[in-house]
Amino acid sequence: MAGVGFRRWAQALSKGRGPGISALLSGRRAASGVSKADLPGPCPTSPDEKAAAAKKYSMTVEDYEPYPDKGEGYGDYPMLPEKSQCERDPWYEWDHPDLRRNWGEPLQWDFDMFIRNRVDTSPSPVDWSTMCKQLFGFIGFMLFMFYVGEKIPAYQPVVSTDKCLGLFICTKFYFKGM
């Protein structure tokens, strides 16, 4: 039976009837596409357009700042700060706790770059100069110790069996190579 359905579907595709592959790939049937109201509009030029765009993205006019219109296609989408999800409060009751965001909240344009298993933009507990000093200090110390180890060889002490008194009590140590 499945072969009959596939054959009819293939015939409809070859004749150009029916939605075909484009409907399967676009997600129209599952209603999973983005509506036109959710897509970015043209870049606002007047204060009234800016206020309407801020309302569209549930932001105040003071907080709303669109991307500059350089022809990159951002439109009226708000320019949000580049902060990772690690910086957001983990104890807050988020609507979507895995992503630490609420429903209707606009996403950062490069949202997939700032999720918790990728870039962490939170400030480091130790500043870079201290980290570099510690790293280069450790590397310098290890190089110095390797140099000293080459110049002053150390060998394990060796005891001859004729100098031992029996129960591992030895009277003299002989160092091999010295």
Image (cartoon, rainbow, N blue to C red):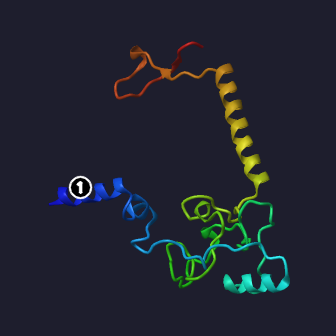
Q: Residue 104, percent across and down?
A: 58, 82
As displayed, is residue 174 above or below residue 130? above
Q: Residue 140, percent across and down?
A: 73, 36
Residue shown at 25% from the left, 59% from the top = 8
| Position of residue 36 in the picture relative to residue 41 (left or right) | left
Residue shown at 54% from the left, 82% from the top = 94
Q: Give the residue number, with chain letter if any, for mark 1.
A: 7
As displayed, is residue 129 above or below residue 36? above
Question: In the rendered image, which quarter contains the N terminus?
Answer: bottom left
Question: In the rendered image, which quarter contains the C terminus?
Answer: top right
Residue type at numbered disc 1: Arg
Q: Quadrant for residue 67, please give it.
A: bottom right
As displayed, is residue 74 above or below residue 128? below
In what element is the residue under mark 1? helix
| Position of residue 44 in the picture relative to residue 162 (left or right) | right
Which residue is nearer to you in this view: 36 or 38?
Answer: 36
Q: Is residue 172 visible?
A: no
Q: Residue 29, percent across and down?
A: 39, 71
Which residue is nearer to you in this view: 167 or 116?
Answer: 116
Q: Residue 166, percent across and down?
A: 34, 24
Which residue is nearer to you in this view: 85 or 163?
Answer: 85
Q: Residues within 10 Å of mark 1 (few under 14, many from 20)?
A: few
Residue shown at 45% from the left, 72% from the top = 32
Q: Is residue 33 visible?
A: yes
